[in-house]
Amino acid sequence: MGLTIQQARIVLRLLSSTVLVFLVAGWGQVGHRIINGNVVQYLPPEMEGMIQQEPFLAAHASDADNRKGGDASKPFIFREGPRHFIDIDSYPEFPSKTVARNFSTAIARYDSTAVFSYGVNPWAIVWTLDSLTAQMRRDDWQKVWQSSADLGHYVGDAHQPLHATKDFDGRSSLTGSRGIHTRYESQMISSYQTLLTVQPDSVHVVTSPVDFAFEIVYQSNSYVDSVYGADVFARQASGWSGSGSPPQTYYAALWEKTQNFTKLQFQRATVAYASLLYTAWINAGSPTLPAVTKVAAAAVEPDAIVLGQNFPNPFNPSTKVSFRLQDRGHVVLSVFSLQGKRVATLIDRTLSAGNYESTFDASSLSLASGMYLYRLQVHAGGRISIRTNKMLLLK
């Protein structure tokens, strides 16, 4: 083998990691819910059936963490815990970024004990993507929604710096650093969750998912030193000794030093997740995703937002779109072609609860006659809600 490792040490790491996975979980429930809940705003209108699953994706964002029980008694390939991390810097090829990306090659080169000890997160992303694609092809929608939620969890984990390093929860060279994993990913994120918003971006087809996943991990690992440096700063700034529960001043200082790259990682995670969902859908042949029935939607979110049918419809050259908000929120009202290209943004601002109307004038846009989609996206109360309708332009 290309990697010399004492088997006893690896077995000990496997056993200890089995305990650890119950204590730490990616970005914590709050972080994973933010990533899974926001992903729908990047999906094209043709994936409306997936967009309507936003409540499910958010609610089941941490299901993968709940499957870790009994890992120690399972064969390696069925263990859940290793799917949530990869100690990429444990591999000798790490400095040159040439760690084997083909899973069979990795097993042959390092043996399965070492590979699963170091974690299999990038491969878990690929395996889940492959399963999701196959499920879409055969219209197995219940499994599609669950695999979609799981995919978001693994992608979120890949963007957490401490899930991409052997220094996952403290360094022996830094007294008092033990426990940084939970302090950073769960407690700090919970305190500052309202500041974790994502910005407009676009999705793309991922041509090589395994390379895509490994590049995410390498990028995440580049922030590890910054996390540890921020921890040292926060402990000094707050006067916390590292014993007992940290004061809020510790988390304020930790956020001060980590907020820029943490926000960036949440943005990257959400867009990467959306791109992989889009890739699965394209590779499955762009199937029609089943829509949530009006009764089911109302049960999840009764009258939170209502998007009316445009009038007149058909129209030429202008039409009015009305909608109602139950709560104050940031509203984006856009018009798309059936190919998913945004042709107009009618509203992009924060509005109070109430009834609204906006005019779409196509006279200066050189649009062809045909069907278009208009989409209302409302960010309120820490979650994204989306409604989409069709309009017909006849010249």
Image (tube, helix red, strand yellow):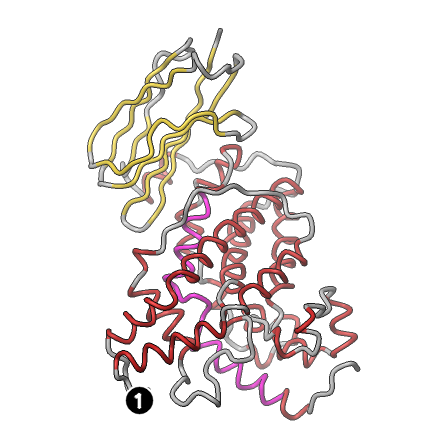
* Residue 22 part of the magenta-drawn span: yes
Q: Residue at x 62, y 69 (%)?
A: 120
| Viewer-side residue, 174 vs 130 | 174
Residue projecting furthest to the top: 395
- Measured as percent of width and height from the top left, residue 346 is found at 36, 26
Q: Which residue is at 43% across, 15% downward?
A: 362
Q: Is residue 210 left or right of residue 235?
A: right
**Rendered-image quadrant of the N terminus:** bottom right
- Position of 158 relative to 388 (above/below): below
Range drawn in magenta: 11-40
Callout 1 environment at 10 Å: few (<14), some (14 to 19), or many (20+)?
A: few
Check disc 1 and report its element: helix, strand or loop.
loop
Relative to 326, say whether 89 is above or below. below
The quadrant in which residue 123 appears is bottom right
Residue 103 vs residue 75, the one in the foreground: 103
- Place of residue 30 in the rendered image (x, y in percent of width and height, measured from the top left): 36, 61
Residue located 61% across and 50% down the image: 132
Query: Image quadrant of residue 228?
Result: bottom left
Query: Callout 1, which amino acid?
Result: Ser
Q: Nearer the viewer, residue 57 or 292?
A: 57
Q: Quadrant of residue 345?
A: top left
Residue 366 location, x and y as percent? 50, 14
Residue 337, compared with residue 42, is above or below; it is above
| Residue 357 lies in the magenta stretch | no
Q: Tell me the residue that label 1 is attached to.
A: 243
